[in-house]
Image (tube, rainbow, N blue to C red):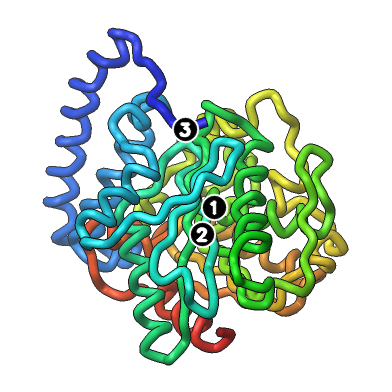
Amino acid sequence: MLNTAIPLSLAEKLDFLPALVSLCVTVVWAMFTGLWRSSSYPKSWLLHVGYAAFRKATSRLSVAQMQYVMPPTNKIYDQYVRKSRKVADTVDLGHGALGHWIGDRNADNVLIWYHGGGFALPANLGYFSFFTRLIADSGRANKSLAVFSLTYTLAPHATYPTQIRQAVEALRYVVDQTKFSPGHILLGGDSAGGNLVGGVLSHLAHPHPAITPVNLSEHLRGAVMIAPWTSMETDFSGQKIDSRGDLITPAVAGPWASAYLGTAKRDYYTDLSTAPADWYSTFPVQKILVCAGGSEILFPIIQDFVKKLKEGFPDVELCVGQREGHVAPIYNLYIGDQTETEQGKRVKSWLREIL
């Protein structure tokens, strides 16, 4: 089930004009206010403007409108290989999913990555820049790494548990049809992709009734979760949330969560934060790294999740990037800021340590 844009009504298409005006006003205002930003705002002027633009776009436009103007992940991968003058290496995983190789598929280790975007938005070129950095940094340490990135069906074209099934199929393909043993396989994901990492680990430990189990001969090498979205909660009325230093707002939680869940009820696979400690204790993975931005609106939820996770799975680390927003190691690159993030540095060093 390849992602295709949801047909827009005439009213939705005409709405792009006032939305564009609103976005331009936001950008101009951010360009001005960014000259006197406080510590509550992003570190650089470029990020201040870029975050403001992304906040406005995602809160002003509907899921259908965003998908209408954003190419699907597999097309972004094609753009990446053309720009980098590489050869595309895409695998049909079945179930409507595609897997894309970045780097040498004959490397010693592979990182399977599930992109974020609230299950509603595709990956962008920032992801492939991030993957390239991880591969290059590992190579400088004489550690051989490839990345296998998943194109899954965006919501609401398909709903839970489709995306977890597709994420599981990516792992199944690598385990069953490549040379990599589980001890040389890592899982990684950001935001909604971090949710999928948790969903896959949950499925490995507690098979989902609607998804075929995966048999592992040993534990996976590790798992990385950047800003994992582990709660589909949409009511934040009792919380004081400051979005000024982030690129998303609470306004996206409702539309994105409902698009993903459809008619399904929330459970431990969708809301890993709500699982008891013994749910995590049998996760078949050696180590887990969780990263979060100190300025992102999900930070309290991520802190709470890691605290619960440690109760059942002690070998987990939380890295916090001060004054960094949601998925900063990737989205900062997308915006155009090439400065290394604290989270990105830790992901690199963590990979060097465990590979």
Q: Which residue sits at x=17%, y=53%?
A: 33
Q: Nearer the viewer, mark 2 or mark 3?
A: 3
Separation of residues labelled 2 and 3 (CA atoms): 18 Å
Quadrant location of residue 354? bottom right
Q: Earlier in the sequence, mark 2 or mark 3?
A: 3
Q: Earlier in the sequence, mark 1 or mark 3?
A: 3
Residue extending farthest top: 10
Mark 2, residue position: 113
Q: Nearer the viewer, residue 54 or 151?
A: 151
Asked if residue 99 lies left or right of residue 331, the reply is: right
Separation of residues labelled 1 and 2 (CA atoms): 8 Å
Q: Please provide percent x and percent y for residue 168.
A: 66, 51
Mark 1, residue position: 193
Q: What's under tag 2, amino acid-wise? A: Trp
Q: Which residue sits at x=37%, y=58%?
A: 127
Q: Which residue sits at x=69%, y=54%?
A: 200
Q: What's under tag 1, amino acid-wise? A: Gly
Mark 3, residue position: 2
The local secondary structure at tag 2 comes to: strand
Contact between marks 1 and 2 (CB within 8 A): the answer is yes
Q: Is residue 146 visible?
A: yes
Q: Nearer the viewer, residue 172 or 230?
A: 172
Residue extending farthest bottom: 141
